[in-house]
Image (cartoon, rainbow, N blue to C red):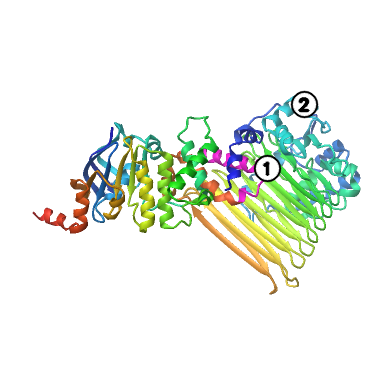
Amino acid sequence: MSLLIENLHANVDGTEILKGLSLEIPKGEVHAIMGPNGSGKSTLSKVLAGHDDYEVTAGSATMDGENLFDLEVDERSRAGLFLAFQYPAEVPGVSNANFLRAARQARLPKGEEIDAVKFYHEMYEKMDVLEMDRKFTARAVNEGFSGGEKKRNEILQMMMLAPKYCLLDETDSGLDIDALKVVAKGVNAMRSPDRGFLVITHYQRLLDYIEPDYVHVMSDGKIVKSGDKSLALELEENGYDFLKEEVAA
Amino acid sequence: MSYDAEVIETDADTAEAIDIDRSKGDFTFPENHKFDAGVGLNKGTIDYICDVKKDADWIREFRHRALEVFESKPMPTNWATHDLDNIDFDKIRYYLSDGQAPKRSWDDVPPEVLETFERLGVPQSERAFLAGVEAQYDSEAAYSNMKEGLEKEGVIFVNSKEGLNEHEEIFRPWFGKVIPTGDNKFSALNSAVFSGGSFIYVPKGVKLKQPLQAYFRINSENFGQFERTLIIVDEDAELTYMEGCTAPKFETATLHSAVVEIVALKNAKVQYITVQNWSSNVFNLVTKRGMAHEGAEIRWIDCNIGSRLTMKYPGVVMKGEGARGEVISIALANDGQHQDTGAKMIHAANNTTSNVVSKSISVGEGRSTYRGQVHIPKHLKGCKNNTECDALLINSKSRTDTYPAITVRGNDHVTQHEASVSQVSEEMLFYMQQRGIGEAEAMSLAVNGFINDLVREFPMEYSVELKRLIELEMEGSVG
């Protein structure tokens, strides 16, 4: 049982960004991908989620054996794939509560209705973990949210949708240390033998709070180095210069 | 949205009680007309209608004069769409009825008519939340009734024929005064052949807690429905009136051309709510205007979802000091539809206030047009107008136009005008879909979000219906 990516190639506007990326995230593990800007980290998450701008030219991605590329964006989500966006979109006029309800409702068989009372109880419980104000439920999705509020909201949605595999795209960007701790608390609360995580980040800092089992370094559309969490510290100390040296050698 | 509203939305009984959608309206029964004025319009048609209705002489004269005005006026295609030229006045039937007086009990209504209104949910709504209902089937009301007690308080709620014949002293002085026959070509047409509609009088100080509702149903092909409504709300009285409408989808064009006049006397409050869901073969050309006396308030809450072409610009003439006028409108134009809507605010006294909020959504090749007129003359003081119009485009082929005309003379006034055009972005859709929400549902959430602040202005029962109607429209709009 894993999220398995093999020899993945993908283009955007005719330019190849992913150039044969392979990676396996078994359930129960947290994998981090680090790498310099422009290495294709965010592209990977968008390709897996199914964004229209990206064209898969070769390779495969399966989730517990199911071919992701056979599924529409919303089907992938309902099958258990969640992407916490680096830049979440705003949905004016739609309250967070209604949005989450629509997402939960979409997971029920036709004709079955969400139990509104239970739904609110559950949402409030998770909001408490993330130290979110109750008034938040009535605000329009991400509209006028600070960077920190947007990221908390992503994690709240993740908690409410209980996915099998979570992709976190630069979730630490734009967060101060307190917000970062809260967000990490939410993610850690979700760690489980039934769930895999792929944490995409530019900085080691996030990994102090969300400890990965494995760290991968991405460069020019591929994984170029993998190791345990000590690799992240190494990168923090020495930067990505080693990539150039290795390429040169 | 508040927690209360969330819970209400899941109330299945409520949703069922007001369950009206396009597919539900698309059925028809065989015609059973004792009286049929035949196709085409001439003096003979007018006389036929007058004879059937046993109109008083002054009404007969009023109709004949109106026919002359109608014939003398050109189609307004110098500013409006040329689609109007596709109306063939010689092929329309102007009066159809079974010759029965409106019934006070649903039990007495002919079975096919009863079934029609039951399928549209009208008797169910009446039981649930209305103070009175009038249900019009083609040219005449089939059912008309008010809750007990209102009659004792002096409230009158009848059709135009009964209003003019039996309560002439109340209605005649105001009839055709807010909207004169010659206001436009279609108000003249209505004045010539009007039939049905609601005549309402609310006496001084009477405040109706529940709305009165009219439901307009077209059952017959090649037909024109021309109801006439006159609402008089006396000093310090209050009324909410709601109207709904549907028709089956015929191959040929159908015409609906109503005139609605409201008179709000000193400190009266009137709210007129429309949810228009005609089928996409209906030309819906309606003139609506209210006159607000001192301290009175008239609000038009207008929602246009159906029809082939709608032209409707509800207006308020603020005649007395401190009067207030408001138009809140939502228009949804899908493929093959043109919603040409707006508002007219005529300030005619000091310290009058008007507010216009219009939101339109264009889907596919749908087209929406906003036309607004605000008039504040030089000699007045302390007038205020706020106009906001926002358009949402769903596809690249959708179209929206805005024609605001704000005439403000004098220095002692405050006016504001804001307009915006936006699109449902791909990033927004991707975001919603990534949460597991299907494309059509995502689109409908985005659209409902866009109009959310206006939907709150509708009574709860109607806002639930509106959301459902929009969901249905969006389901059909994505491949």
Decide whether the magenta segment is chiefly helix, strand or loop.
Answer: helix
- Label 1 or label 2, whichever lies nearer to me, is 2
Q: Which residue is mark 2?
A: B110
Q: Amino acid at mark 2?
A: Pro
Q: Residue at x 77, y 45 (%)?
A: B209
Can the viewer see residue B426 in this picture? no
The answer to which quarter of the image holds residue B433 is top left
Q: Which residues are magenta?
A: B454-477
Furthest residue toward top: B111
Chain of the residue under label 1 = B
Q: Amino acid at mark 1?
A: Asp
Answer whether labels 1 and 2 touch (C-beta < 8 Å): no
Q: Which residue is mark 1?
A: B88
Mark number, residue A148: none
Q: Position of residue A133 (x, y in %)?
A: 50, 52
Between the C-alphas of marks 1 and 2, the distance is: 31 Å
Q: Residue at x 28, y 52 (%)?
A: A208
Furthest residue toward left: A249
Q: Position of residue B385 (x, y in %)?
A: 67, 64
Tell me if A182 is positioned left or right of B247 in this view: left
User: Please, is residue B268 above or below residue B245 in the view?
Assistant: below
Q: Residue at x 78, y 60 (%)?
A: B295
